Amino acid sequence: MKIIPASYKILDEFAYPAEMLKKIERHGRTCYKSEDNITKDSAEKFIRELIKNGHESVLEHVSVSVKIICDQGISHELVRHRIASYSQESTRYCNYSKNKFENELTFIRPLFWPYTSIEYKTWLTTMQTIENEYLDLINIGTSPQQARLLLPNSLKTEIDVTMNLRSGRNFFKQRTTNKAHPQMREIAIPLLKDMQKLLPPVFEDIIPFEEPQHYANNR
């Protein structure tokens, strides 16, 4: 059994984020026929005005892809977001008793329980039992798509997500608030901060809810 933290990786090449902003500007200025106002440095100001005026449909012309490693429960929340494309690790076809999975299950650690707490110890014991029973079923000939009925929300999954920037803003507005699940915020808040550095005029106005200190006990 392996326990890992949630994580993510931005998959797109961001060597030229300025080009992404210029693309948004080009499409946006078509609406106002103001292409003659495009200059070397005009994109950021123009995009800020678009967002200020609620003209966010132009942001749909640019998308970003991110690989997210989270638990199954969080992935179920994630795939509710539209418009987006998802490619997810399949428990129906992945046989975790095989060598490429190191013959074990991998779980995402719950960040809100300290390692010494009774809650964490109960969770850990339960995950170990699930792994044992899953592997036993596989060993007696049960198929992965049948044995997966034992698999819990804590099971690690990898999911590639592609969202246009308008959908990305919606995702961050919903999933970085104090109403979002803490394990969703664990991913969404640092990802938002990275996107704010890469594309500031698109995301800089979104203020995340910073997690309470006790959520950091297990880091």
Image (cartoon, rainbow, N blue to C red):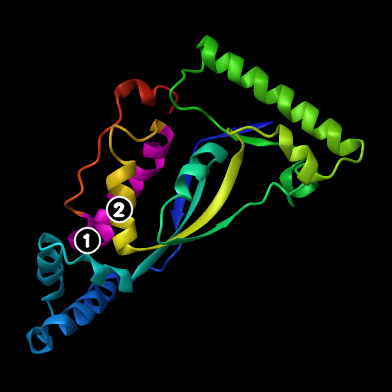
Q: Nearer the viewer, residue 74 or 97?
A: 74
The residue under the point 62% across, 36% down is: 155
User: CA gap, disc 1 to disc 2?
Assistant: 12 Å
189 over 47 or under it: above or below: above
Number of marks in the rendered image: 2
Q: Could you tell me residue 12's position as x and y percent?
A: 42, 66
Q: Could you tell me residue 172's position as x and y percent?
A: 31, 48
Splitting the image into 4 quarters, where does residue 15 fall? bottom left
The numbered disc on residue 217 is none
Disc nearest the viewer among 1 and 2:
2
Residue located farthest toward the top when viewing the structure as drawn = 118
Provide the major secondary structure of the magenta segment. Answer: helix
85 over 80 or under it: above or below: below
Q: Is residue 80 left or right of residue 30?
A: right
Type of amino acid at the residue the image marks with label 1: Val
The residue under the point 73% across, 39% down is: 148
Q: Would you name the residue on which mark 1 appears?
A: 202
User: The C terminus is located in which quarter?
Assistant: top left
Q: Would you name the residue on which mark 2 appears?
A: 170
The disc, 1 or 2, on the residue closer to the chain's N-terminal end is: 2
The residue under the point 25% across, 62% down is: 199
178 over 196 or under it: above or below: above
Check disc 2: other Cα within 10 Å, few if <14, some if 14-19, many if 20+.
Answer: some
User: The N terminus is located in which quarter?
Assistant: top right
Is residue 66 on the magenta stretch? no
Q: Could you tell me residue 37's position as x and y percent?
A: 7, 84
- Label 2: element kind: helix
The residue under the point 40% across, 69% down is: 13
Q: Nearer the viewer, residue 120 or 76?
A: 76
Q: Which residues are magenta?
A: 183-203
Residue located farthest toward the right when viewing the structure as drawn = 140
